[in-house]
Each structure stands twice: as C-alpha cells, then as structure tokens.
Image: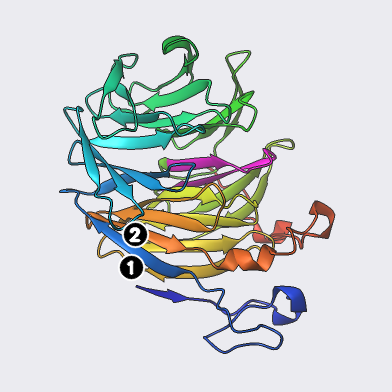
Amino acid sequence: ARSTRPHPRNAASIQPDTMVRFGGVPMANEGFQSEDPTLERTFRGHKDGVTAVAFNPNMKQLVTASLDNSLMVWNFKPQMRSYRFSGHKAAVYSVAYSPTGDCIASGSKDRTIRLWAPGVEGKSSVLKAHTNTVRTVSFSADGRLLLSGSDDKTLKVHALTGGARFRQTMTGHMNWVRCAQFSAEARCAVSASDDKTVRLWDVHQNTCIHVYDDHFAAVNAVAFHPDGTCVASGGADAVVQLWDVRSKKLAQHYQGAHGGNVNSVAFHPSGNFLLTTSNDNTLKVWDLREGQLFYTLNGHEGAALCADFSPGGDYFASGGADEQVMVWRTNFDRLLADGPPSRAAKPDGPKASNVPPARPRT
C-alpha cells in the first residue's frame, strides 16, 4: 500500500502550525512523526467483495459486510479470532454499529434488515419492512432509531426502544435509494439515489425539505457533516460535492474527483477531512479547509467499495472488491492536536468561480 500527497495549490497559504510533509521531505518545525496515513492491518476472510465497514465504538472490533451473504467481526487483539455472522440469504450491502455497541444492523439483497447481538453466537432478529433490496442502514446518534433505504425507492425509520418496530416511510425518490443517514439530532435525514438526486428530509414532519439535483448520474453515497451544516455526496459521475444545508447551495465541487464511480463518502469527526472510495481502486482524503485533494491511497487490488472513520477519527477502515479489509492509522489528524480551527478562522473552500454553473440536463 502506498500514499501520495499532492502539492498544494498555494503553499504560502499553509500556516506553519499545519505544515505537513510534501513528497516525503520533512518541512521546518515538523518533528519526526509522519502525518501520512499508514496501513496497520489487513484482514482476509470474505469470499466476495466487501461492501461496508463499521467500527465498534469501543474500538475492539470492526464489522464488515460482503457480497458473500455474510458479516464478519474482526478483533483487533491478535490472539482473538474473527467470526462470521450467517443468516442473510443474499448479498449484504450495508452494516452499522449502534452508538452503544450493543447492536449491529445489516441490510441485504434478501430484502431484510437484521439486528445482531455482537456476541460470537451470531443471534439476530429480522425486520421485514422493505419490498426490495435493502442498500443502506444507519443508526441515529442516540441509538434509538434506525434508518434504512431500499431499491423499493423508499426510506423507512424504525424505533428501537422497547423492541424494534416500524415507525414511518419517507417517499419521493424515483429510483433505488443507495445511501441514507440521520443528522446528529435525527431531526433530519439525507439520502442518495439512482434518480441522480440527493434529498434532505424533515424526519419529524415526514417530508422532503429539498432536492439537490446537480449530479449527472446515480448518487451512490451521502453523509452529514458532524456539525450538521452541510452534506457530502459522491456518484457514478466521479464527482464529489458538498452542499450547504441552510442555504441549499452547492459549497464545494470536485469534478473528476476519482477516475471512476465514487462508492462512499465519510467525514472525519473533526469535519475538516472527507474520505472517499472509488472503482478506480483508490481511497482519497480531501482537505475541506483548503478545498483540495490531500492524499491518494493505493492498497486495494480492485474497486475500493467502502470506507469509514473510527469514532475518534484516529483510524479508518476500507473494503474492496478484492475481498480485503484494510485498517489504516489516520496520522494526519495530528494536525488537529491543538484543536480544530474555529469556523471563523477556516480558510475558504473552492470559490464560487470553482463551482461549475448548473448545466441543462439531457
């Protein structure tokens, strides 16, 4: 595995306290610790592509989903073996750990959601709410709600307190729902679809607040910024975009962000970096303060299908079509050791001139 760090567009704009290594050459006052991401562990055990990854909040385990119909739980202690959850009857496309770590949710092509007890027994209960493939599952920050999205073009909210039960359906997408996520307080949700749109939802009112339609192909991935003020999306058009939730305007646009479909997007908990994966086999890290590419990571021997940060942001994991699971140490979060810069002090992202004007659809 190797990482490359592009030279900044304007080196003079980088402040001394945020200097990093360019091309492996230590810069003044940098010290001896590298801020480059490093590959720490590689797990092998799945028999088909790895579609989703999620860290246990206690950082003792990682759970992954695969096209081989199974989930696997990987222990970070070398002496502890991994174990497999079998129950789904078709490919598993999504997995999530509850914030308390006491439940794992998964969504499958078999049209079901399963809620698993994390123990080695692999006990699970089944939620049958969708009428087609379940592409995405995610918990609210308090663990009380579960959001799911499906090829049946709907999103569904499930209440988990006192036993799992269906609560509501949100409709509006005209094609498969690929990805969905709650905002931090679960008042809103955001979803991505093959209908080329990103939709913002008011969960309490069960209505669509806004439709972002600047993608020109299916939108595969979407995520809320940790502070809830913007959302990121990535699609089959190889574009990564950030949208301001309040103004409803496009904030940052990365044309040709990858050399193929963008499969996942994930914010670093600081909100300063975005991690993306693609069919071009790479992971990329974007510096959202500077509005530019920060790292390109080459490790997977096929499409990089998914990636996510650990809750603390000091690690991230990725899964690929090569059936491998990779765990990386972030390292560049050392730049934030003195605390993330205040919103007022953040350098601007791409200027308005860097955001392409909307083009007519064909």
Dot 1 alpha-carbon crowd within 10 angstroms: few under 14, some 14 to 19, many 20 or more: some
Q: Which residue is mark 1?
A: 299
Which of disc 2 and disc 1 is earlier in sequence? Answer: 1
The range drawn in magenta is 220-235
Residue 104 lies, with reference to residue 47, above or below; the image says above
Q: Is residue 45 magenta?
A: no
Q: Is residue 362 visible?
A: no
Most extreme residue toward the front is: 79
In percent of width and height, residue 55 lies at 43, 45
Residue 224 on the magenta span: yes
Residue 237 rendering spot, x and y as whole percentages: 42, 51
Q: Which secondary structure lies at badge 2?
A: strand
Q: Residue at x 54, y 58 (%)?
A: 314
Residue 144, numbered circle: none
Question: Where does the image place residue 360, in percent across and percent down from the top left?
Answer: 54, 43
Which of the pair 131/213 is nearer the observer? 131
| Quadrant housing residue 337 | bottom right
Q: What kind of secondary structure does the magenta stretch mostly adopt?
A: strand
Circle 2 sits on which residue?
326
At 56% from the left and 69% from the top, the residue drawn is: 294
Q: Are the residues flagged by discs 1 and 2 in contact, CB closer than 8 Å?
A: yes
